[in-house]
Image (cartoon, rainbow, N blue to C red):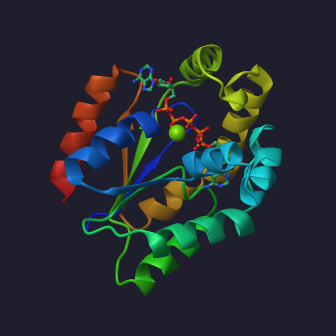
């Protein structure tokens, strides 16, 4: 089983690179942001609640996010493993994930953190905001708030995984294909 975490600030390329990884390694892709957005489109109760936070660039509370992910892991049939994208984002989420996986006799293989300078992140997200209808990309203050929350609440998780020798980082400022190449090499070396 291969259980990978793809990690990094908003706009670093988690979703883009996840597509390549899940295809090559046949993993189940669980992106909490994508799941929330699906629920928002379908106007579910979860979606309505999550929207209150997402539109402001704040984290959805752990109680909501952790329960949602627990259900997804229970329902998912993955013979090869999971790729977690955008989860965990807090220490409590990381601990909950460890326990969900240990309940099914698994654990996190490693975390891949994608580093990108802040100016590039803002430009990428503003561009997507112009080309798509992702509301949290359409306002620079919301983008800056997402980055600030990443720095203050989420980045601390690097230490959590470093202590377990499960932390790797790559330079995400290059082209999508160059980043993909580095990520594939990294995975190959560590499985
Ligand atoms: P989420 O959907 O996870 O958004 P995010 O972390 O803000 O990051 P993005 O998905 O916007 O960026 P990405 O890193 O996936 O990059 P992408 O490949 O798309 O979360 C959204 C919200 O949901 C959160 O703010 C929060 O409210 C809530 N939420 C989600 N998970 C949560 C959790 N666990 N706990 C609590 N709340 C949670 O690329 C971005 C753009 O850049 C694209 O246009 C892409 O084409 C482009 N791009 C990608 N790579 C490159 C490259 N190498 N060069 C140039 N452009 C590139
Ligand atoms: Mg994403």
Observer-nearest residue: 51 or 158? Answer: 51
Please tell me which residue is depicted at 58% across the width and 20% down the height of the picture. 128
Q: Which residue in the rendered view is the most extreme toward the front?
A: 42
Q: Count all numbered tags in the image, as a single digit.
A: 0
Q: Position of residue 34 (x, y in %)?
A: 56, 46
Please tell me which residue is depicted at 54% across the width and 56% down the height of the picture. 87
Q: Quadrant of residue 136?
A: top right
Whether residue 10 can be seen here? yes
Observer-nearest residue: 172 or 162? Answer: 172
In the picture, measured across the screen, residue 30 lies left or right of residue 176, that is right
**Where, quadrant-wise, is the N terminus in this rendering?**
bottom left
Please tell me which residue is depicted at 73% across the width and 55% down the height of the picture. 44
Depicted 137 relative to depicted 93: above or below: above
**Where, quadrant-wise, is the C terminus in this rendering?**
bottom left
Q: Position of residue 15 (x, y in %)?
A: 45, 38
Q: Quadrant of residue 57?
A: top right
Q: Position of residue 29 (x, y in %)?
A: 40, 53
Please tell me which residue is depicted at 24% across the width and 54% down the height of the picture. 26
Whether residue 155 can be seen here? no
Q: Quadrant of ligand 1?
A: top right
Q: Quadrant of residue 61?
A: bottom right
Depicted 184 relative to depicted 100: above or below: above
Q: Position of residue 42 (x, y in %)?
A: 67, 48
């Amino acid at each position: 089983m291969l259980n990978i975490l793809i990690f990094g600030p908003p706009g670093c390329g988690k979703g883009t690179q996840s597509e390549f990884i899940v295809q090559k390694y046949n993993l189940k892709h669980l992106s909490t942001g994508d799941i929330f957005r699906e629920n928002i489109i379908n106007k579910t109760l979860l979606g309505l609640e999550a929207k209150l936070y997402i539109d402001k660039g704040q984290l959805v509370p752990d109680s909501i996010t952790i329960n949602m992910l627990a259900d997804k892991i229970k329902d998912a049939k993955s013979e090869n493993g999971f790729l977690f994208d955008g989860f965990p984002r807090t220490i409590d989420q990381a601990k909950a994930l460890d326990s969900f996986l240990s309940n099914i006799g698994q654990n996190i293989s490693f975390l891949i953190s994608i580093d990108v300078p802040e100016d590039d992140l803002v430009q990428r997200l503003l561009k997507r905001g112009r080309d798509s209808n992702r509301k949290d990309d359409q306002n620079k203050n919301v983008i800056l708030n997402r980055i600030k929350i990443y720095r203050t609440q989420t980045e601390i998780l690097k230490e959590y995984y470093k202590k377990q020798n499960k932390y790797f980082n790559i330079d995400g400022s290059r082209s999508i294909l160059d980043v993909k190449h580095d990520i594939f090499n990294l995975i190959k070396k560590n499985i």
